[in-house]
Image (cartoon, rainbow, N blue to C red):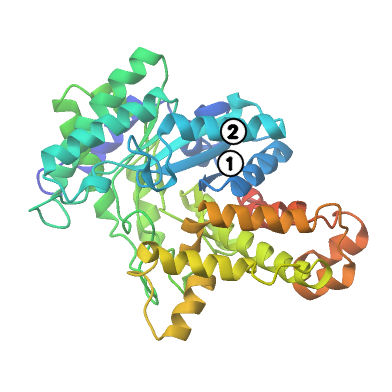
Amino acid sequence: MEGTATFAELDGFILSQRRGLVPGAPAPTPSGADILAELATARAAGQPFGITSVCSANPFVIEAALLQAKEDGTPALIEATCNQVNQHGGYTGMTAADFRDFVFGIAQDVGFPRARIILGGDHLGPNPWKSLPAEEAMAEAEIMVEDFLRAGFLKIHLDCSMGCAGEPVALADAEVASRAARLAAVAERVAAQVGTKPYYIIGTEVPAPGGTVEAVPETEVTDPEAPLTTYAIHRQVFTEQGLGRMLGRVIALVVQPGVEHGNESVTRYSSAAARALTGALAHLPGLIFEAHATDYQTAEALADLVRDGLPILKVGPSLTFALREALYGLDEIAAVIAPEIDPEVLGLAEVMEQQMMLKPQYWRSHYHGNPAALRILRHYSYSDRIRYYWPEPEAVTAVDRLFARLDGVTIPEPLISQYLPRFYTRVAAGTLPATARGLAIEAVRDVLRIYAAACRPAA
């Protein structure tokens, strides 16, 4: 940690920026976005809890997330990445304000209060424009950060780790911190104007937004000194640039705790393997770590992440993976009980295949193999690159047509058993109506229930 503060100095500085943490003290009762500031406090008090961070722009997923939060009586944390949403529309076609209104519209439909929605911006930085010279890319990033703050986003991940045109792929820590401070200054200025109090995530130890490329048989855990160095350098740079006061609202640093998924494999979290890393939190009081994603982890692993100091459980692809499973199962059911009259109309899987082949840019660099292997990956990969195609007009039409074919139909139990067996027991018991749209939402909620339980781990 040459040129940075000692562990003891970091301890004292962070404590001076945050409320005192008293082990054994009663757990807080968080509300709204302030729940983010209470995650470290609760862990220090011996009563850890977590929050599910839903990273998706899929309307079915967002509806399921809001319904789950409504049932649990918790805030709903919904995040968008810089590639999904930005001032140019991102790949969703939405600006930050558009995304906010999109989420709020679904919330109104399901009766979820806006005040309990926390919007997050992930990887906010120059990544969408990294092919440009650094100054141009950072100017775009400044506009994006301002738009996110004006739209009411309160969880802000500042990520300036990537090199721009003519620069190394990864930048030196001091340059990353300097660029992050530049964006933080914009965020703080806008927050003061609109009267909000954002919370910040800093650092990166993750793949680029969108996920890994191939298999991940081994995932290296972040060196425990790395987050200490990251925080010390950010502290120094932010303070030098007059942003010292905002450090009290830096709540987490991004690390790699040994959690990853590729196309056909998942690296499971191991508390033992991450012990040295999570032990570094002893030198970062008032802070937590954040993993870039926790998809496909077991219930036990998710609960361990919460206990070990990574209580923001970010999830995205596994939610749309579950949705795709349900939609494909429903399409098989429709073929049995409500077959298409027009032989020219394609089934849902064929519509999606057609869209992926017409616009291969979202999967081509991620999937490799012979034609048969590629087709399997396009539809069934854990990386779930098919999620980028559900907003395509042809895909939306195909899903609407599927639901129309099954509208008013109570799906027979034997077909549930055959094509959607995860729901059979509940349907047979009469606790789950066998309606098409309801089953699609339920598939996503089944994943979210695992997260909800993990956010309340047993001591």
Q: Mark number for residue 47? A: 1
Q: Is 285 situated left or right of 34 in this image?
A: left
Mark 2 neighbour density, 10 Å: few (under 14) some (14–19) many (20 or more): some
Residue in the image at 59% along x and 64% along y? 298
Question: Which quadrant holds residue 215?
Answer: bottom left
Q: x%, y% of residue 248?
A: 34, 27
Residue ranking furthest to the left: 166
Image position of 258 (left or right of 159): right
**Distance between mark 1 and mark 2 Cα atoms:** 6 Å
29 or 196: which is nearer to us? 196
Residue 24: x, y in percent? 56, 36
Q: Height in image: 421 above or below 115?
A: below
Q: Position of residue 22 (x, y in %)?
A: 48, 32
Secondary element under disc 1, as helix, strand or loop, is loop
Q: Return the residue nearer the eye: 297 or 141.
A: 141
Kind of residue at disc 1: Gln
- Number of numbered discs: 2
- Residue at the (68%, 63%) spot, across then down: 326
Q: Is residue 373 left or right of residue 70?
A: left
Residue 294 location in percent, x, y?
A: 49, 57
* Residue at 45% across, 55% down: 293
**Residue 325 visible in image:** yes
Name the element at disc 2.
loop
Amino acid type assigned to the residue bearing label 2 in the image: Ala
Please name the residue that numbered disc 2 is placed on.
27
Q: Is residue 126 above or below residue 373?
A: above
Quarter where residue 123 is shown: top left
> Is there a contact, CB below 8 Å, between mark 1 and mark 2?
yes
